[in-house]
Image: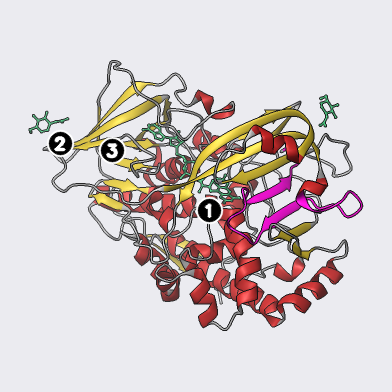
Amino acid sequence: MMLNIPRLFVFGLITVVRRSCAFLENTDKEVTEPPKIAIIGGGIGGTSASYFLSELFGDDAILDLYEADTIGGRLATIPIGERKYEVGGSIIHPKNEYMVKFASKFGLAKRAECSSRMGLFNGEEYVFKDSDWSFVTIMKLLWRYGLDAYRLEELTESMLGSFGKIYRLQEEGHAYEDVGSLLSAMDPTFLKMTHSPTASWLKGLGFHDLMINELVMAVTQCNYGQTPDIQAFVGAISVAGADSDLWAVDGGNRRVPEELLKASRAALLKRLVTEISFKEDGRFTVASVDSEMPFKHLFVEGNSAAIPEVEEQISQPQDYDIVIIATPLTEDKSNIKFTNFTEELKFPGRYERIVCTMVQGKLVPETLKFTDDDPLDEILVTNPRLIFNSFGKQFPVDLEDCSENLPDVWKIFSPNPLPEEQLNIFFKERNSTHVIDWLAYPHYESDQEMAKFVLTPGMYHVNAIEWAGSAMEMEIIGAKNVALLAYKYWKKDPNAGRKTIKDEL
Ligand SMILES: Cc1cc2nc3c(=O)[nH]c(=O)nc-3n(C[C@H](O)[C@H](O)[C@H](O)COP(=O)(O)OP(=O)(O)OC[C@H]3O[C@@H](n4cnc5c(N)ncnc54)[C@H](O)[C@@H]3O)c2cc1C
Ligand SMILES: *[C@@H]1O[C@H](CO)[C@@H](O)[C@H](O)[C@H]1NC(C)=O
Ligand SMILES: *[C@@H]1O[C@H](CO)[C@@H](O)[C@H](O)[C@H]1NC(C)=O
């Protein structure tokens, strides 16, 4: 969801390394026979993994991408009236280099972003409201939060600087077996942050309770449906999501995974993977069933979180040299069975339920304690006991001009479905109501165990990275990492894929 904390929170890029004049030196060994690779999941993680695998292996590798539902996964749009709206992952940070690069490579424009007024609501009243003038808003922020407002911006800026190191490391072909080592390679503090609650980490840096309980609470609620008890690395990602320079892809963010799949050499198998088994020769058998859109109810009112019951259908097992899993594997999110592995594979944890209610209709502003004379477009909450996590006015994915006359569409995130009676109180007129029930992102602990990318040699898990933080760019970084791991494994050479990038002085 788009926040609009004004430009005080714009994070400048600290360019760690100058890359414009870099040249590449390839140190790869001779190519061996082409491997057969399965990619399971066609979200941004699986499609970018396919893309990177095509890049690394060249024409020869045989890539099969299994997707049971829709390409894009948690990047999803629904039609409301004549237009489409984002209902899943919606905002992208300007420093998300992979997303920026993909959008430009595929000729995808940024969609128009309109200014909006945000308020921080505690259930009774607004503890903070944007002004129409960003200068006044900045003064109000400094008035309420003092230097904390400025220091939070500085902190995020410096973290983004360290975060940016990953692009250079990956371009040079470095890969990591687990999420902890990947984070440490960017900055050892990042791994420590995953073991500390956001609130105490910020307190340790001298931030005050007011800032943590209001602004930070509002962004963790809005972005992850959780409180600042969540581990501090994902807490920091939430804070970075409060920039005003955030963007989205014209036509919908799911266009990026669609284009990535086309640009890769993967064949799309519209099948639901049911079982992966380890073979004596070290290869893998992937069993799947025909899926005539088992999650079809995703785009109607109902529960997309429920895992579909798979009827007994003819299974078509296929053998692969390498398997890339690009979907969450926790019990609540996956039915994939793992058989004949020497070690038991465990996927602890659960995903957070976020109900996204899209209403086209007229809001009764008084029910949210504001008036038509003093309108708000974005209501964030500082109280985790409210029935909603955020409430925001939406624009279609193909918006060209903010002055366009559009019917009001509101997006409400809540931990549980909103009862009809409640919606009738919020809205005086409702043309349409769509409910998308997500198991959206991990339920984060204060001290979060980091997962492994390598499940066994030859089998890799992109979504391990979600336990550090779930976001489009994170999935792409995870995908690039597992593509490199797979390449090194196949070449039997830990240095395969390594490049030396020399900067011109
Ligand atoms: C409501 C919401 C808001 C969000 N907001 C943002 C945001 O503003 N910015 C941001 O960067 N991120 C945001 N995120 C997070 C972001 O959307 C996710 O991190 C990212 O899209 C996950 O991508 P993925 O490819 O790893 O997983 P998914 O998108 O979940 O893809 C997995 C795919 O695998 C398929 N699949 C699963 N099991 C099988 C099987 N057995 N066989 C075959 N196929 C299978 C599924 O159908 C799915 O398409 C948001 C997420 C949600 C839900
Ligand atoms: C698991 O291994 C056993 C013994 O090697 C074999 O009989 C069985 O078919 C295997 N199962 C699968 C699903 O490959
Ligand atoms: C309801 O839909 C009609 C037709 O699409 C539109 O003209 C009208 O503005 C909508 N009303 C509201 C309250 O959104």
In the rendered view, would you say 349 is above or below 134? Answer: above
Q: Residue at x 51, y 31 (%)?
A: 303
- Residue labelled 3 has its Cβ within 8 Å of some atom of ligand 2: no
Disc 1 residue crowd, few under 14, some 14–19, many 20+, Cα 10 Å:
many
Residue for badge 1: 473
Dividing the picture into quarters, in which one does residue 417 lie?
A: top right
Q: Is residue 70 left or right of residue 490?
A: right
Q: Is residue 376 left or right of residue 320?
A: right
Query: Residues under labels 2 and 1: Cα distance?
Result: 34 Å
Q: Is residue 481 visible?
A: yes
Q: Earlier in the sequence, mark 2 or mark 3?
A: 3
Closer to the observer: label 2 or label 3? Answer: 2
Q: Position of residue 34 (x, y in %)?
A: 29, 37
Residue type beneath disc 3: Pro
Residue for badge 3: 35
What is the span of residues highlighted in magenta in the rendered image?
Answer: 368-396
Instruction: Residue at the far right: name it.
Output: 373
Q: Earlier in the sequence, mark 3 or mark 1?
A: 3
Q: Is residue 251 visible?
A: no
Q: Earlier in the sequence, mark 2 or mark 1?
A: 2
Q: Is residue 454 left or right of residue 270?
A: left
Q: Position of residue 258 (x, y in %)?
A: 55, 35
The reply to whether callout 3 and callout 1 are in contact (CB within 8 Å) is no
Number of numbered discs present? 3
Residue type beneath disc 2: Lys
